[in-house]
Image (cartoon, rainbow, N blue to C red):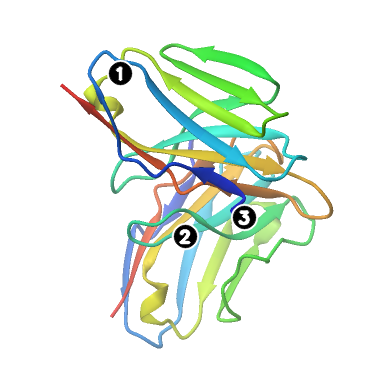
Amino acid sequence: GAGVSQSPSNKVTEKGKDVELRCDPISGHTALYWYRQSLGQGLEFLIYFQGNSAPDKSGLPSDRFSAERTGGSVSTLTIQRTQQEDSAVYFCASSFVMNTEAFFGQGTRLTVV
Amino acid sequence: QKEVEQNSGPLSVPEGAIASLNCTYSDRGSQSFFWYRQYSGKSPELIMSIYSNGDKEDGRFTAQLNKASQYVSLLIRDSQPSDSATYLCAVANSGGSNYKLTFGKGTLLTVNP
């Protein structure tokens, strides 16, 4: 597709369940980012992938959060044992390489009940 | 000290006026600077990028960068009600071993008809 694609658009899950969020970046983009945005708050960095290098996981809030990127393309963000404070919109973005313009997907709104 | 700072606003301007949005950053090694627009409930949309000192114009938008002062701004000329949104400043740097694309919390702009 032409843009960054995220799925699902919305996810409601019960507390304690695991969820997987998917991101399909723009074709040819080597850099991929995950951010989350809680209601009324700014964008919080979670994790960054650049090509085949080890990802920068410094923003992951706890060990319940993990992410992988297969074949340098599609990425999956996994949240285990979800908590209510995980409720937020999770955004994925991609850029051609680092330091270049990053484009965002439409986000996944996660609600933990 | 916050890495990227913006006045949260709200900044209110009349239709047709110039809106001036400001951003300061703490890392002198920052290399790339971006402005995003985010409508309520939507994902961030890239509107400007700037990489070197000076001004960069694109239509009604002008980005200004002063690396010595660690300051970047966005001017919106002939503001329209459709410009009402939150404007996010993003700063990229690849100092050390980690690349970071850090966002400010955003400035809410309201353009009054």
For the residue labelled by badge 3, is the local secondary structure a helix, a strand or a loop?
loop
Chain letter belonging to callout 3: B
On screen, residue B48 versus residue A7, left or right, reads right
Q: Cβ–Cβ below 8 Å for labels 3 and 1? A: no
Q: Position of residue A1 (x, y in %)?
A: 48, 39
Q: From the image, tell me which residue sits under label 1.
A: B79
Q: Amino acid at mark 1?
A: Ser
In the rendered image, the vertical position of residue B106 relative to residue B2, given as above or below? above
> Dot 2 surroundings within 10 Å: few (below 14), some, or many (20 or more)?
many
Quadrant of image for the N terminus of chain B: bottom right
| Between discs 3 and 1, the one toward the N terminus | 3
Q: From the image, tell me which residue sits under label 3.
A: B1
Q: Position of residue A63 (x, y in %)?
A: 61, 81
On screen, residue B2 versus residue B37, left or right, reads right
Cα gap from disc 2 to disc 1, whole angstroms: 29 Å
> Dot 1 surroundings within 10 Å: few (below 14), some, or many (20 or more)?
many
